[in-house]
Amino acid sequence: MMERIAEASPRFKARIAGVFYLLNGLTYGFADGSVRGKLVVYGDAAATAHNILAHEPLYRLGFAADLIAAVCYITVTLLLYDLFKPVNRSLSLLAAFFSLVGCAVMALSTLFHLAPLVVLGGAQYLSVFKAEQLQALALMFLKLHAQASSIYMVFFGCYCLLIGYLIFRSTFLPRILGALMAFAGLVWLTFLSPPLANYLSPYNLASGFLGEGSLMLWLLVIGVNVQRWKEQASAA
């Protein structure tokens, strides 16, 4: 399948990237919004533990959704690297590097999502801890997951900035998409300071999703101008 995609037209690759971009958004949104957003009460360890144990299948599904989101974004990264090689191979490779590192951090951070199930699982070796201590540990792991998310958002910010520049320099995508992606990158870089990102929320999140969402929709519906892509590839 990957060989067929590699040999496919640029428009087909762009649309496949759009599909995986959409899947990434849906799965990540489900895990962060419909699972952690509903079950985790960051100021109440007991309530969080009760919610997790009462909805364990849903919580485990959130873990799976996180992993799927990371795999989808890796696929998007590889496809966009191939599309933007004619614009600037080195910058396209650098962008892919930032994205893949972000995806790796994202995938590893899912362990913090899974850890509360181990802590609250009632294993015999955990009987030395009081219930309140185990609940506090579970919440601590979830807060570590939130800290890790700030780290990988910074890498994705660098990625979006570079992709925005590559779009702006390309001849086969509208420059407005490049500007929106670059702005999304700047927004994600606010996670260098989590207190600043929290202060700007939800406006920074909406702006970032607007930038990446615009590119996703364009790739999904229209793709790229094949003739101009081929001209730029020939010139490169």
Image: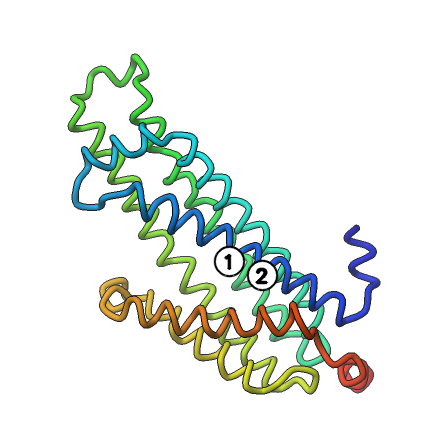
Query: From this viewpoint, which residue is outermost toward the top?
Result: 124
Q: Is residue 195 left or right of residue 234?
A: left
Measured from the top left, where is residue 213 in percent x and y? 51, 69
Q: Is residue 91 above or below residue 30?
A: below
Q: Residues within 10 Å of mark 2 (few under 14, many from 20)?
A: many
Q: Residues within 10 Å of mark 1 (few under 14, many from 20)?
A: some
Residue type at numbered disc 1: Gly
* Residue at x 25% of width, y 30% of height: 50
Contact between labelled residues 2 and 1, with CB atoms less than 8 Å apart: yes
The quadrant in which residue 188 appears is bottom left
* Residue at x 50% of width, y 76% of height: 181
Q: Is residue 5 above or below residue 133?
A: below
Q: How many marks?
A: 2
Mark 1 residue element: helix
Q: Is residue 172 left or right of residue 110?
A: right
For label 1, the residue is 25
Mark 1–mark 2 Cα distance, whole angstroms, equals 6 Å
For label 2, the residue is 21
* Residue at x 17% of width, y 40% of height: 44
Q: Is residue 202 left or right of residue 19?
A: left
Name the quadrant of the C terminus.
bottom right
Q: Is residue 84 above or below residue 75?
A: below
